[in-house]
Image (spheres, grey):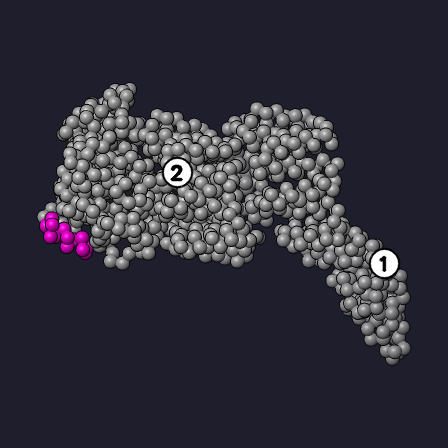
Amino acid sequence: MNNHGIGALRVRGYIDQLGEALNVAGWAWFEEAPQQRLEIEFLINGTPAGRVVAEVYRKDVAEAGIGDGHYGFDWPLVLPLLELHGAPNITLSAREVKTGQPLSNSLDFTPSELATRLAALPVTAELPRRLAALRAATHLTPEDPWPAKALADVLRDAGRTDEAAIVLRQLLAQHKRFWHAHVMLGHLARAAGERTAALSWFEQAAELAPGDVWRWLDISEELRALDRFEDAKTALQRAEEIKSDFWAVALGRGYCARAQAEHEAARRYFEDAIRLAPTELAPRIGLIEELRDAGMLDDARTAAKALLEAYPGSMPLLLSLAYTERQAGCAEEAARFFGAALAQEPENPTLLAELARQEYRLGRQQESNAHLIRALELSPGHTDAVTQLASQALTVGDAAQAYEIYRAAAAIKPGELAFRFGMLDTQAWQGRMQDALMGLQAMEREYGATPQLQSWRITLLRRTGQMDEALHAARTATAAAPQQFWLWVERFQTELLAGSDAMLQKSLLGIPATTRAERAVKRRCIGALAESLWQTEAALKHYEDAAQLYPNDVSLQEALARIQLMRFNLPGARAHLRRQYELMAADRRLRRESLNISQSLLGQIIHEYALDEDMAESWPALSGLSPFERVAPLATLVREAPDSTAAAAALLLALRQAEKLDFIPEPGDAMLIPRLITAFWDQPDVPADVEAMMQSWRTCNPGHEWRRFDTARAQDYLAAKFPGPVLGAFQRVREVPQKADIFRLAVLVAEGGVYADADDRCLRPLDNLVPHGANLVLPQEEFGCAGNHFLAAAPGHPVLQAALRTVAAAINRGDNEIPWLLSGPGLLTRVLAQHLTERGVNAGLPPGLVLLDRRELGRSVAGGCFATYKVFHMRHRKRIDAAALRQNA
C-alpha cells in the first residue's frame, strides 16, 4: 500500500438503511489505506449526533471485493435528539471524522415517515428505547394522536400508570375528541379502584363514540361495581340496541344478576352468552364463577377442569380453579393451581402474593416469605405483599416492625391509602391512639370522608372503647354511603356492643349483602344478635347457615364452638374448635403456640365440662325442656355438685332465658354500694393508654372516690385486712391476672364499692348502672357465666365472701386449674349459682342482686378494650373487627 497523507485519502462508503431496531447501518473505508478502521460521525439535519468505528465484518462488502470486509457500522439512532428538531424533514447523514468527508448518500424522511418507523420498533426492544422511540414519534407528529396513545400503552404495561395518565391527559389537551384516550384513562382508573372516575371517563368516551358497543359495556361494568344495578342494566340495554344478540351483553347481564345474588338468572345469562359465542372463554368462566359463588363447588371444579383440557394453561381457568379450591378449604390444591399460574408468569407479583398466602396457610413460612420478597423486588409497593408481611409482624405482636413495613411502602407509593392506614393502625397497636386518630383526620382532610376512611375510623374508635364516638361515626357513615357493605357491618359490630335495640335492628336490616361471602357475614351477624339475646338455638342455626356459605371463617368456627358448649354438645364444640385451630394453624405456628385445642381457654372449659359426669347424664333429658322447666332440675344439680361449673353456668343461662333475673331492690331503696372505685395495675407506672381508660372512671364519676393499687400496695392492704390464707394465696400465685382476681374480691369484701379492670373504659356515670337498693352488681357474659371484670358490691356480700374463701383455699392447697376456672368467671359462676339455690330460684334473684345483661353493661362500660400490653397476648382479644371479617372473606 502507498503511504499517502491523511488529507489525500478518499472515503468510500454508503448508508444502507435505518434498520428495524432503529440502527443506522452502512460501511466506510479508505481504499488507499484498507487496514485503517474509520471513525464515522452521524448527523441529524446537520447536527452531530454520535460516532462509531466502522469495523464490523460484512460478508456482502467482502464479496464485493472491498478489502477484508471489516468496514461495517451499525449505529443506534439517538432517539431523544429527534425531539430537538422541528424541520419539515429529517436527514440522517454521516462523515469520516478526521477528514470530514461525507459518505456518498443520506437518508431522508418526512416526520410522518420517521414517526411510523419509530412506532414500529419491535416489542422485544428494551423498554427505555421503546419509550424514547414513541416519545420522539409523538413529538414529530403532534397532529397524530396514535403515537402518544402507543406511548401510554407501553407505560401502562410497564406498571408506570401515573406517567401513562399524564401522557393521555396531554394528548386530550390537543385532541379533545380522541375518545380512545378517554377509554384508556377509564381502564387506568378501574385498575386503581377509582370506579367513579372510571365511569366518568367511559361516559365521556361514549358521548364521543355513541355507536361503539364496548363503551356501553364499560359503563355497565362500572355502574355494577358502584352497586347501581338498574343503571347498569340500562347501559346494557343501550348496548343491545347497538348490537343485538351480542354475547358480551348477555355476559354483562349475568354479572349483574350474580352481583344481586340472582343465581338462577345469572346462570341463564351466562348460558346465553355461551350459546351466542361458543368459542369465547369469558362466558364459560363467568358460569364457573357463578357456580362457585352459589356454593356449587364440585360443579365449578368439574366444569373448570373440563375446560382446562380444551384450553390447557389458560390463566383465567387456573386462577378460577385456585380460588375454587381455596373456598373449598383445599389448601394444597389451591397452592398447586396458583403455582401453575405462576409458572406461566413467573414475574407476576400478584400471583406471587397469592401463592405466598397459600403457602403461609399450609405452614410453609419460608416459601411464603420468599414469594413475598420476590413480589416486592418486582413491584416494591405491591399492596398485597406489603400487607401480608405487615400482618405477619402483627401476628407475633411486633407492631413496631409492622409500622416500619408500612412506612417504607408508603414512601414508595405515597398515594396508597392502605399503607397510610396501616401506619395509623400499627401506631394504635403501639398505644399511640391519638397519633393514629390525628393521622386519620389528616387523611380525611386530604381525601374527604370516604367510606374506607370512615370504616377505619369506626374500627379504631371501637377497638379502644370510645363507643359514643364510634356509634356517631358509624351512623353518619352509613347514612352517607348506604350501599357500602363493610360500613354497615362495622356499624352492626358497634351497635351490638353499645347501641340501642332499635339501632341494632336498623343496622342489621341495612347490611346490603349480595355476594356469597357477604351473605355469610350477614348471616353471622344475625347469629351474633341471637346469641346476644341468649337465643342459643336460633344462633346455632344462623351460624351453621353462615358456615355453609363460608366454611373458612375463623371467628365463625369459634362462635359455633361457643354455642355448642352452651348447649352442652361437647363433641360439636370440640369439632368446631378443632376446625378453628386448623384455620389458625399458620398464625399459631408463627407465634410458636400449640395447635392442641386443650391449650386454649375454650378447650379447657370443654375439658372441664366433659369431666362432669352428672351433668352429662342429665343433659339429654334437660335439653328437651323449656328454659323455665330446666331451672328446678339444674338447681338440684348445683346443690348436689357445687363444684360443677357446667351446672352453674347452665342454671344462670336458663334463668336468663326464662326471664327470671329481674332486679328486686332491698327494702328502703338506699344506696348500699359505697361511692368508691378501685383499680389494679401491677406496676407503679401505668402505660398512657391504660391511664386514659382509668381516667374515664374519674371523669364520668366525679362524686366517687377513685384509687389504684399496684402489687406492693395490694399486698400491704391484704396484710392489714386479710393476713391469713388470703394474703398467702396472693403471694403464692405468679400470674398477674390471678393476683388481680384475689385482690378485687378482698377489697370489695372489706370495703365494698366498684372494681373495674384496667382495660375497661367507663362511658356513663355509674348511677345509670348501680341502682339504689342493690347490694351486688355483676355482669352475665359468655356461656351464661358471671363476669368479674366489673363488679359493684356492698361490703361483706356473702357471694364475694364465699368466692374469696374458695379461691384462697384452692390456691393454698396447690390447685392448678386455669385462672378462668380457679379464680375468675368460673369461680364466681359456681359461687353465685350456689347462693341462688340456697335461697331458692323459683322466685328469681334475691333482693339487691343485679345480674347485668352484657349489652346493658356495654352501654355504660366498654370492657376488654385494646391496650398496648395485650399485643403479645392477642388471644385474649374478644372482639372481631369487621376489618378482620373482611380479610377472612
Q: Position of residue 758 (x, y in %)?
A: 28, 49
Q: Residue furthest toward the left?
A: 724
Q: How far separated are the C-alphas under marks 2 and 1?
A: 73 Å
Q: Position of residue 11 (x, y in %)?
A: 88, 70
Residue 581 shown left or right of residue 139 in the figure: left
Magenta stretch encompasses residue 464: no
Magenta highlight: main SS: helix
Find out whether the residues at labels 2 and 1 contact each other: C-beta distance under 8 Å: no
Q: Determine the secondary structure under disc 1.
A: strand
State the image coordinates of residue 698 (x, y, percent, origin top left). 27, 51
**Callout 2: helix, strand or loop?**
helix
The local crowd at label 2, few if under 14, some if 14 to 19, many if 20 or more residues have their Cα within 10 Å, is many
Amino acid residing under circle 2: Glu
- Residue toward you, 628 or 466: 466
Relative vertical location of residue 614 with respect to residue 361 in this rendering, above or below: above
Label number found at residue 495: 2
Disc 1 marks which residue? 109
Q: Nearer the viewer, residue 700 or 102?
A: 700
Question: Looking at the picture, which amino acid does disc 1 mark?
Answer: Phe
Say which residue appears at 35% left-offset and 25% top-offset.
537
Q: Is residue 31 left or right of residue 133?
A: right
**Comes first in the chain, label 2 or label 1:** 1
Looking at the rendering, the stretch of residues picked out in magenta corresponds to 711-723
- Residue 7's image quarter? bottom right
Residue at image x 41%, y 35%? 503
Front position among marks 2 and 1: 2
864 lies above or below 516: below
721 within the magenta span = yes
